[in-house]
Amino acid sequence: NAGVTQTPKFRVLKTGQSMTLLCAQDMNHEYMYWYRQDPGMGLRLIHYSVGEGTTAKGEVPDGYNVSRLKKQNFLLGLESAAPSQTSVYFCASSYDGQSSYNEQFFGPGTRLTVL
Amino acid sequence: GQSLEQPSEVTAVEGAIVQINCTYQTSGFYGLSWYQQHDGGAPTFLSYNALDGLEETGRFSSFLSRSDSYGYLLLQELQMKDSASYFCAVSTRNDYKLSFGAGTTVTVRA
């Protein structure tokens, strides 16, 4: 099992450009999450999904959109990137119907720089 | 909303014991989790407490006191590989998500 994978690993954007980050999991997890991590601020939840076709806002959703068209994939979109969105983005998944949703499995992260 | 407080840094020598405290303020508290993150890596799950008391997993233990809105992670027999950031996170009833603290950087010295 690959676990949780993220594409791309690194990206540099110019202000105003758009991009999509892809997260995939092969653990048949129901719940998926997108976080951003900035120095000294821990992990902040952007959006999350509790099942295929569902999405919900987290703590810092502005400037981002998400889609969960397939159970195994969770996409994070930046429509018009801003320097404030420079961060490390982590995707996570949890809950296969038996395990606790508190045990989240994280991908390796995407390091995004917006110039 | 939720707020969590944990120390920003802790330094200790190999073989020592370190306790990382976490206090939280939240409505509808459900449980407290702990995650470890090595520099440049992904966070990994360490433990989860929903009930008062101590949970032991090898050299690591986690404690929760719901009445005091307080928990801690205890790292025993510290090893160099334990140098990492440690995050506490709270979950609340029926919303399937976690709120993380800012993290504690643990540095283990020889």
Image: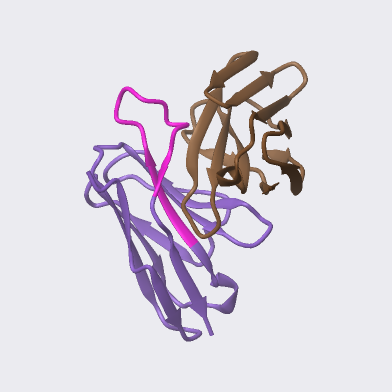
- Look at the picture and state if B2 lies above or below B62: below
Image quadrant where one finds the C terminus of chain A: bottom right
Q: Which residues are magenta?
A: A89-106
Name of the residue lying farthest toward the front: B110
In percent of width and height, residue A89 lies at 47, 61
In percent of width and height, residue A90 lies at 45, 56
Which residue: 51% across, 85% down? A15
Q: Is residue B29 visible?
A: no
- Look at the picture and state if B66 lies above or below B18: above
Find chain A in the image and tell me its colour.
purple
In percent of width and height, residue A60 lies at 57, 56
Find chain B in the image and tell me its colour.
brown
Q: Residue A97: say if magenta.
A: yes
Which residue: 53% across, 58% down? A36
Is A23 left, or right, of B77 in this rendering? left
Which residue: 51% across, 60% down? B40
Q: Residue A8: say if magenta.
A: no
Which residue: 61% across, 62% down? A38
